[in-house]
Image (cartoon, rainbow, N blue to C red):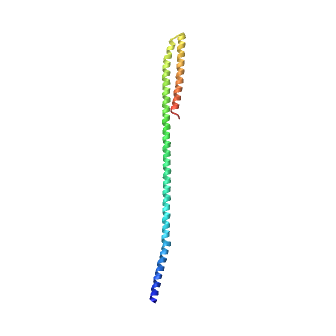
Amino acid sequence: MNLFLKILAAVAMIVIVIVGLSVSYYYVIFLPQQENTRIELQREKELADQAQQQETQTNAAILKQEAQSKAEEMRANQQALLDRCLLDAQRKFVSEGQALSTSAKSCDQKTGVARTACQEVHVEAFAKNDTDLQQDKNNCFKQYPQ
């Protein structure tokens, strides 16, 4: 019986040591390692979130720059179209003015009432040409607003 008690005491001691080692392993090794893993995963998630946020900001900046470039290009195109329209109006004005000047010279060959009537017709034609120029310019500004 004495031997049985000694074996039982030895087995109990071994069981106590195994349980103690298991508890020690759990608190000393397993839990800290699990906490470190959790912290590392959280850190990786934060880094991924920061990278995503930075990428979003970069994409937004690129889109903004592209929009500004397009707007500037459109303004430049609009300005070029306006300039072209105004130039065409000015050319039309000059061309018609030259034609009127040429036909106005014929008034010099006339005398009296015919000369006065001819000059009045040409004065009205020159005034209409001026009005047409202003109207053409206004149409250009309406068609290509700045």
**Viewer-closest of 33 and 107:** 33
Residue with the most extreme bottom position:
2
Residue 106: image location, x then y, percent: 49, 14
Residue with the most extreme top position:
112
Residue with the most extreme front position:
1
What residue is shown at x 49% (from left), y 30% (from top)? 85
Give above or below for 18 relative to 141: below
What residue is shown at x 53% (from left), y 12% (from top)? 115
Residue 54: image location, x then y, percent: 50, 53
Residue 100: image location, x then y, percent: 50, 19
**Viewer-closest of 81 and 2:** 2
Residue 83: image location, x then y, percent: 49, 32
Q: Which image quarter is the N terminus in?
A: bottom left
**Viewer-closest of 124 and 16:** 16
What residue is shown at x 49% (from left), y 42% (from top)? 69
Instruction: Give the tally of numbered discs.
Output: 0
Give above or below for 40 relative to 100: below
What residue is shown at x 48% (from left), y 25% (from top)? 92
Give above or below for 30 relative to 99: below
Give above or below for 30 relative to 100: below
